[in-house]
Image (cartoon, helix red, strand yellow):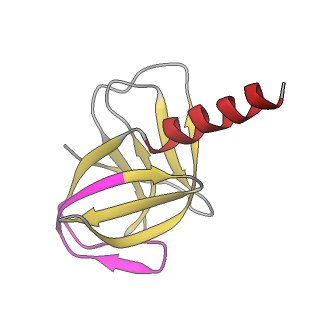
């Protein structure tokens, strides 16, 4: 039983870090306490935080959780509110990375 729990936790941990998406910010945006310049970023969910990378260098991170909806998203999009990223909808899945403590009021398109 202990081996089964350990294996399950390993698989779940891999699943949380298994996807990375490329997003393009058209204007400067805040992620957590960091303001990101306009440009291209790779986004990954690592455990309980979302990480924005620029050329393999972590430039911003924030606490986040993965939510699963009922329908798939056609495109990767960012939910934003007052120049802050609050969620990332992942193309081809029904998954959404929600940055905890944020609320969304507008949507900006990513890649």
Q: How many marks?
A: 0
Q: Eyeballing the image, is 4 above or below 67? A: above
Which residue is farthest front? Answer: 3
Q: Nearer the viewer, residue 60 or 14?
A: 14
Residue 96 in the image, given as x and y percentages of width and height: 48, 39
Q: Is residue 19 visible?
A: yes
Residue 91 lies in the magenta stretch: no
In the rendered view, tell whether residue 72 sits above or below residue 88.
Answer: above
Residue 101 relative to residue 36: left or right? right
Q: Left or right: where does residue 109 sit relative to residue 49?
A: left
User: Does 23 sit above or below residue 37?
Assistant: above
**Residue drawn at (37%, 36%) of the image:** 90
What is the chief secondary structure element of the magenta stretch? strand
Q: Is residue 26 magenta?
A: yes
Q: What residue is drawn where x is 41% and y is 58%?
A: 80
From the viewer's side, name the closer residue of 73 and 83. Answer: 73
Q: Is residue 38 above or below residue 89?
A: below
Please report the residue visible at 71 percent of the width from the left and 35 percent of the height from the top.
Answer: 6
Q: Which residues are magenta?
A: 25-43
The percent position of residue 105, horizontal first and vertical second, equals: 46, 54
Image point (32%, 31%), residue name: 91
Front-lying residue, 85 or 22:
22
Residue 51 is left or right of residue 53, and the answer is right
- Indicate the quadrant containing the N terminus: top left, top right, bottom left or bottom right: top right
Specify whether residue 30 is in view.
no
- On the image, the x and y values in percent for residue 4 come to 74, 25
* Residue at the top extreme of this rendering: 71
């Amino acid at each position: 039983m202990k081996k089964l729990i350990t294996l399950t936790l390993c698989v779940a941990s891999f699943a949380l870090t298994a996807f990375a998406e490329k997003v393009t910010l058209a204007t400067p945006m805040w992620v957590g306490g960091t303001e990101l310049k306009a440009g291209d970023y790779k986004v990954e969910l690592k455990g309980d935080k979302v990480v924005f990378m620029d050329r393999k260098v972590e430039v911003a991170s924030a606490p986040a959780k993965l939510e699963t909806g009922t329908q798939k998203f056609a495109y990767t999009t960012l939910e934003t509110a007052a120049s802050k990223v609050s969620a990332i909808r992942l193309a081809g899945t029904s998954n959404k990375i929600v940055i905890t403590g944020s609320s969304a009021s507008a949507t900006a398109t990513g890649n």
